[in-house]
Image: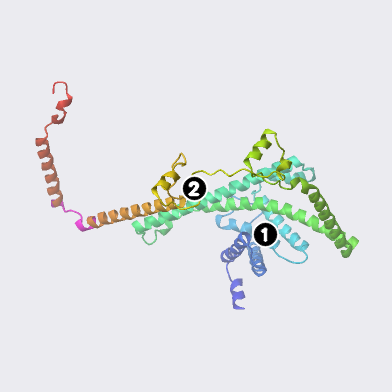
Amino acid sequence: MVEGKMEEELPLPALFEQARQIHSNASESSVDQDTVRKGIEQLRKCDGMVSKLGLFSSNETKDDVSTSNLKYLLVPFYLAELTEKVSQEDRIPVIKASQDHLKEFISICEALEFVPEDELEATRQGASDTFATRRAKKIARFKRQKAAEAKLQEIKERKERRGRSLRAAALSTPVDVGDEDALEDDGEEEREAWLSTISLALCKAFDLLEMLKKEEEMLLAVKERQSKDGEEEFAREVLDERTKKVETWHRSAAARAPLSKPVEPITCATFAQDVIEGRASVSQAGDHKHHHQPLIFGPASLVNRPITSERERIAAQVFQPGYRLPTMSIEEAGLREMEIMNKWQERNAELMKEATSSWHRDGPRTAEEEEDFEEAKARAWDDWKDDNPRGAGNKKLTPCG
């Protein structure tokens, strides 16, 4: 009782966010019917609140709608998708309710000029729609859907990069109180994201509406046939039709069996050469008897027995491949490389630790120490120039040196 009262008192943004989360979970994976019905109830409350507040008007366009209200345009679409997932015995009312929500969503988007012009022209054509126009419409819709998905992915990656940059900047430079809003974007990115989401939802809405219409026609045809012939007669016809299909499949499989039976493999190389050169046929493979000894690479006296003397070892090395055999497997080589890489990384980490610790141990120099260091460096350089006059090392390279 308390939980229901709290849900009724939730503001529109919080209620919409809860319903949107349920819709996202239902789209990505299967959820139970109680969760689906809970999401439908929350979306209906959102729809009622949006209607009472009058967030959208018929004399407005998408440019007149504020960024914070754009997301509420998706309430009928989310409601249609969740309604379509309701499971009950009679599915026709579910399909009709989902279609009504989709039509409401499309009509609102059309009034706000979200629907593309080519989609409107295809809708106006109606029954005169040909196969070519339907194909062109589906291709254009598919391109818009891919463009919207790519735009949403780009915005998501941009937000992640900006979040990482802000976290790194916050670690290096503390942010004063009151300056947090300066790090946020100006709202253009959020508006762009919701516009792309609405465009993607429109493409899905048109596809889902067409699918639901076909499903409704099929269910109505089945229901009409059941009412005309009776349920028992209809079930008997379905069983007879399935039996005929199974019998036809078995007959065709039996006819293909002699042709599809695998041929016995030819294991004798001499007989295979006879077949290739035309001295024998494949049908004689069953009558052929193998009388040839198998080829043995290496001394026959050393096959399948251990080597006990130096003479046998040298004899066993007579027949060897003409290439070097691998000394380890690919897995062993990979493990060896991983071990070398780990040692190299550990060594680099130790060197970095030593360098960092020595820098902290030495500490920054004072002004006087810096002057003494520069003076000692200049004196050392003067001493080196005295010991090594200009051109002293190049005398042997000159013609007259």
How is the protein colored in the picture? rainbow
Work out whether 377 lies above or below 67: above
Work out whether 105 lies above or below 311: below
Residue located at (58% from left, 44% from top): 294
Q: CA distance from mark 2 to mark 1?
A: 78 Å
Mark 2 element type: helix
> Of the residues under marks 2 and 1, which one precedes in the sequence?
1
Amino acid under label 2? Ser
Residue located at (55% from left, 48% from top): 151
The span shown in magenta is 359-368
Q: Residue 206 placed where, x, y %?
A: 69, 51
The answer to whether residue 366 is magenta is yes
Q: Residue 253 placed where, x, y %?
A: 79, 50
Where does label 2 land, which residue? 301
Residue 10 placement: quadrant: bottom right
Where does label 1 land, which residue? 81
Amino acid under label 1? Glu
Residue located at (78% from left, 61% from top): 92
Residue 255 left/right relative to 57:
right
